[in-house]
Amino acid sequence: MEAVIDIKVIKTEKSRISEVPFDNLPFGKYFTDHMLEVDYADGQWQKPVIRPFQPITIMPTNATLHYGQSIFEGIKAYINPEGKAGIFRPYDNFRRFNISADRMMMPAVPEEIFIEGMRQLIELDIKWIPRKGDHSMYIRPFMFATDNVIGVRPSSTYKFMILLSPTGPYYPKPVSIHVEEKYTRAAPGGIGFAKAAGNYASSLKAFAEANEKGYDQVLWTDAFQHKLVQEMGTMNVFFIIGNTAITPDLDGAILEGVTRDSVITILEELDLTVEERNLNIDEIIAADKAGTLKEAFGTGTAAVISPIKELAYKGVTVKLDPDSWTISPEVKRRLNAIQEGRSADVHGWMVPTAH
């Protein structure tokens, strides 16, 4: 039975859609006319409201500004050939969001607010979903603490919101990667598995230093030896060696990617063996030297699949030719066809926004 909730809707007086250059949509720059907002106070969630996209006001003593209780998710919605909107695997993101909330000592968001609120918001701004391939509506649910008391303790009040952003490709071209040996993204017992804002703040310096060296992104490694592969920047990562696709296992230090799980399913449909296990960077270098490293790519909601054209480690550079690949392009083709409603959704991944 579908969750039902009464959401107050305050519509904008004038749409901004005509101001958006849909032929050139950089990621995360433009936002739709409306947003969902709901507060948590006195131990319970208050009545959600969909209102015009606008600034929010916080006090300088806001707990998030001082202690970082903030989490988010990334989801996408697509338009099918019949003009109906569908959300890609939102229940998986809903589950992961509340896993993050639990780790950060925040209240769980009810399904009727998260899923039904998202549905109603998208239906209201459905005209904003781009109608062309490799484009979509990026959905950003997030929650942050709102107590106005300085003190290291969990907040007693919170705000949950959902924003919508029409977007094009995140990485339009294959990327070059620097294997990170100095900085650490996450360690066992930490918050690597949570989609917490602090994870991304702490990664910025490593990204900046990689960019200064001419690389697009970093490949994170373990905190102890800087040998075991973890994540690639904002994505999970896969390496195809021989007829096996290898991706780091979920050891608590990396994010349980929804796209990662979808890619594993499709790879198995393509009759590849998929291994989720520890992967040493030396194994990748050796596979390249032996000629068995066929493809390498990142996976994530924003980028879907991002080919790796170059990987640098300790003076060794692995160069790959994404134009010659056959596996990851086919995975992306199949995944996009399901998302855009051009192929049968045999896995039940797409959730319609209209009841």
Image (cartoon, rainbow, N blue to C red):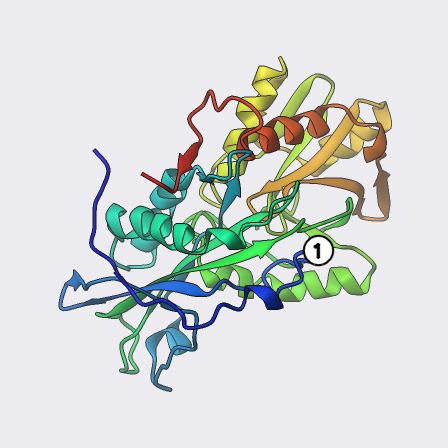
Q: Quadrant of residue 53?
A: bottom left
Judge whether 310 appears above or below 24 on screen: above
Left or right of 327: which side holds 97? left
The kind of residue tagged 1 is: Asp
Number of marks: 1
Whether residue 335 can be seen here: yes
Residue 110 image point, x, y percent: 24, 50
**Frontmost residue, 283 versus 341:** 341
Residue 321 image point, x, y percent: 85, 34
Residue at screen point 63% across, 51% down: 233
Left or right of 302: which side holds 163? left
Residue at screen point 50% across, 31% down: 261
Residue at screen point 72% across, 29% down: 329
Q: Quadrant of residue 299?
A: top right
**Frontmost residue, 158 versus 293:** 158
Left or right of 346: which side holds 99? left
**Frontmost residue, 41 versus 129:** 129
Q: Secondary structure at mark 1?
A: loop
**Frontmost residue, 191 versus 157:** 157
Q: Please give the residue where the numbered disc 1 appears in the rendered image.
A: 23
Quadrant in which the N terminus is drawn:
top left
Residue 307 image point, x, y percent: 73, 39
Whether residue 98 can be seen here: no
Residue 50 image point, x, y percent: 33, 63
Judge whether 75 appears above or below 62 on screen: above
Disc 1 residue crowd, few under 14, some 14–19, many 20+, Cα 10 Å: few
Residue at screen point 67% across, 59% down: 26
Quadrant in which the C terminus is drawn:
top left
Judge whether 5 appears above or below 208 on screen: above
Judge whether 203 appears above or below 175 on screen: below
